[in-house]
Image: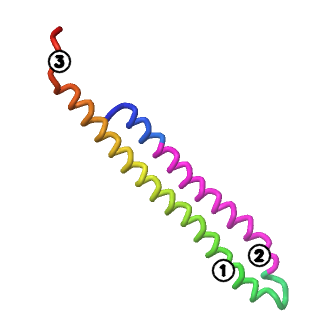
Amino acid sequence: MTTAIARWRGLAALVADAVTHGASAIERVHLATARRPFQIIERAPGIGAPSKGVHAVHDVAVSGVYQSIRAVTGLVAKVVDAGLELADDSTGETEHSASASPKSTR
């Protein structure tokens, strides 16, 4: 593996980890922030019971969005890795064939 490809792979992995872990952290904050007003509304007479259902739907929707972000990030990371693998193989073949060719003795 060439040094440049290794660096690109490292950068790609770093970005994928940042997006994945960042999405998880933001999801936790998002759910915690929404939980506060829902807890208040859920105690109100007449609307408490229906608001629990709305709260559950909200949490499922929010979690689904962040899960989608993590899934797409994982797929993009795999595609980038495959592309870098192809680039590395292509570079390796070019370097190998260039070094295998006979050199001029002029």
Q: Amino acid at mark 2?
A: Phe
Of label 2 and label 3, which has the lower sequence position?
Answer: 2
Residue pushed farthest right?
45
Left or right: 99 as drawn, with respect to 16: left
Q: Amino acid at mark 3?
A: Lys
Residue range in magenta is: 12-41
Q: CA distance from mark 1 to mark 3?
A: 70 Å
Q: Which SS class for mark 3?
A: loop
Residue topped by disc 1: 57
Q: Nearer the viewer, residue 88 or 78?
A: 88
If the image is split into quadrants, where does the N terminus sit? top left
Of label 2 and label 1, which has the lower sequence position?
Answer: 2
Residue at left 32%, top 39%?
Answer: 88
Residue at left 59%, top 53%?
Answer: 22
How packed is label 1: few (under 14 Cα within 10 Å), some, or many (20 or more)? Answer: few
Position of residue 59 measured from the top left corner of the image (x, y, whole percent) = 65, 74
Position of residue 86 measured from the top left corner of the image (x, y, whole percent) = 33, 45
Q: CA distance from mark 2 to mark 3?
A: 76 Å
Of the numbered discs in the image, which one, if any, rests on residue 74?
A: none
Q: CA distance from mark 2 to mark 1?
A: 12 Å
How packed is label 3: few (under 14 Cα within 10 Å), some, or many (20 or more)? Answer: few
Q: Quadrant of residue 100?
A: top left
Q: Which SS class for mark 2?
A: helix
Q: Amino acid at mark 1?
A: Val
Q: Which SS class for mark 1?
A: helix
Q: Quadrant of residue 58?
A: bottom right
Position of residue 75 measured from the top left corner of the image (x, y, whole percent) = 45, 59
Q: Nearer the viewer, residue 25 or 76?
A: 76
Residue topped by disc 2: 38
